[in-house]
Image (cartoon, rainbow, N blue to C red):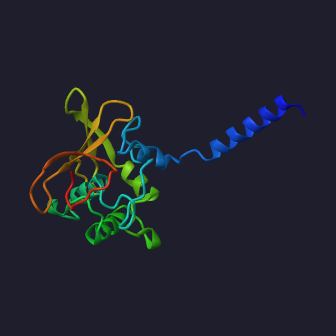
Amino acid sequence: MSRFSRTIIASAAALAFSVTLNTSPAAASVSRGYIDENAGAQNDFSDEATLWSGSAYQNSNAVGVIQAILYAEFIIDAVDVDCAYGSMTTWGVKELQKKLGFTGSDVDGVVGPKTWDKLDDRLVEGSVYSDSMLYIKYRATNGTTPNLFLRARVSGGTYMFKYYGGLFGGNAGWKQALYRSLSGRECS
């Protein structure tokens, strides 16, 4: 076999190997560092990281997105939105999973692919907020559709959620849904 043939075969093997190691869809959004937009609203959460107490993102604004949904579902209060995945959030996610029709071991308090998929189906594009932002409504299980999120009006645009100031009442406003770890118990 010629040196050229071996080089071609080795290159093809390396390419095939790198394709199999390609990042999973869940890693795609995480690698950007924020919860992002895909075309349309009902697939925006399909590539997000699994969140639970103990996960790498247990203290991040990404948790604030889940807590905003728990608040919209009347499972937790606005002061409980603190971007920390603790026992209250674990309990709240279990309650949400029951409302979404989960049973048995699927009611685990973990926001993984099954939970993200169910939540994804509840997103509806809303009205224009500004030249660069669009409201995203969440269709709650009780039938209400609050303007829960803002989303950049560009491909791969970031999500933002409404933060009411948490237990300490400060720093309220729209917060970017980042995966970056937070040092305290307040969204930033």
Residue sitting at x 21%, y 54%: 187
- View extreme (top): residue: 131
Instruction: List x then y, in percent, for residue 10.
Output: 76, 38
Instruction: List x then y, in percent, for residue 3.
Output: 84, 31
Nearer-the-camera pick, 27 or 127:
27
Toward which corner of the image does residue 112 lie, by quadrant? bottom left
- View extreme (front): residue: 3
Say above or below: 113 vs 6.
below
Say above or below: 85 vs 39.
below
**How many numbered marks does the figure carry?**
0
Nearer-the-camera pick, 127 or 188:
188
* Image position of 15 (left or right of 49): right
Say above or below: 176 vs 98.
above
Q: Quadrant of the N terminus?
A: top right
Residue sitting at x 47%, y 48%: 27
- View extreme (left): residue: 169
* Image position of 80 (left or right of 122): left
Instruction: List x then y, in percent, for residue 11.
Output: 73, 35
Residue sitting at x 39%, y 65%: 110
Instruction: List x then y, in percent, for residue 97.
Output: 36, 64
Nearer-the-camera pick, 163 or 127:
163
Residue sitting at x 30%, y 71%: 91
- View extreme (right): residue: 1
* Image position of 2 (left or right of 73): right
* Image position of 96 (left or right of 15): left
